[in-house]
Image: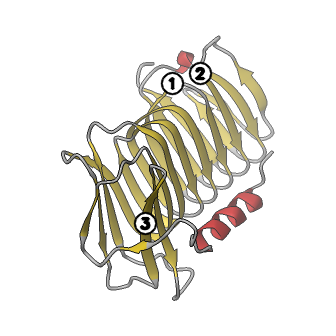
Amino acid sequence: MRKTAVVLLSVIMVISAALSAVISVKASNEDLVEIKDAVQSMDIVFGGGNLYVELWDEEYVGLKIEKGEKSNGFEYKFEVKNEVLYIEGSQKNGNTFAKGDNKVCLYIPSDKYLEDFTLISGDADTLVKNIYCKNLRIDAAVGKVDIIEFNTVNADITLGMGIINAKGKIAGNADAFCGAGILNIKFSDAEKEHDYLINTTFGKIKIGDTVYGVMSNEKNINDSDSKINLECVAGQIELEFEND
């Protein structure tokens, strides 16, 4: 069983570390940067502020950074390496308990299919729209992540003390871990399209109309090719289905 403290510590360490091996370019305030390199995957480490990821009609990836009045020492850098777009938003100074009011917008071509989309979020508010990828990874410490109309084969979702609201489709396998936060997933298919492995400590997991309470260790098998592993320590996981 993964422990909440380990998850939170690892997220904080990743966000605070300087990614000098892969980061080389710093974007200027309010510049729309046209990233015309080949991009097959995205790896985003975002400490604080507001992050918006959405589709647009251009053939290249766009990135725009707007510093707020209370930026709180956050700086943003990016680089494309081996067809992976790395974006880092880390805090160089300021109050470590304030996320700041910076705004970062990431624009993805509307026909782009990504191999991997990874978002590691510290204390940020994030809105992601229409991600289409093979592997989706969301790791949130204390902020809020809304991911709308995603379509992925496999998913790995880790939540510390924040909130994740997700809506979309998982065709393959998924792992979802909730420490002390709230994880809501609305699937575009039916409950019977997945098998479930359920594990709770002090938390609660709700799948459709069925609630699994404290110290649950259950299997819900529908003979599906999609396996979903759910683990909740002290928070709440709720799965809904559009086709039930």
Q: Which residue is mark 1?
A: 171
For this orientation, the residue located farthest to the bottom is 94
Asked if labels 2 and 3 touch by Cβ distance under 8 angstroms, the answer is no
Asked if labels 2 and 1 touch by Cβ distance under 8 angstroms, the answer is yes
Q: Which residue is mark 3?
A: 78
Graded by Cα atoms within 10 Å as few (under 14), some (14 to 19) or many (20 or more), the crowding at tag 1 reads some
Q: Which residue is mark 2?
A: 226
Lower position in the chain sequence, tag 3 or tag 2: 3
Which secondary structure lies at badge 1?
loop
Task: Give x and y (percent) for residue 235.
Answer: 65, 50
Q: Nearer the viewer, residue 176 or 162?
A: 176
Q: Nearer the viewer, mark 3 or mark 2?
A: 3
Which secondary structure lies at badge 3?
strand
Q: Residue at x 26, y 50 (%)?
A: 60
- Amino acid under disc 3: Phe
- Amino acid under disc 1: Ala
Q: CA distance from mark 1 to mark 2?
A: 6 Å
- Amino acid under disc 2: Ser
Task: Give x and y (percent) for residue 204.
Answer: 67, 41
Q: CA distance from mark 3 to mark 1?
A: 31 Å
Graded by Cα atoms within 10 Å as few (under 14), some (14 to 19) or many (20 or more), the crowding at tag 3 reads many
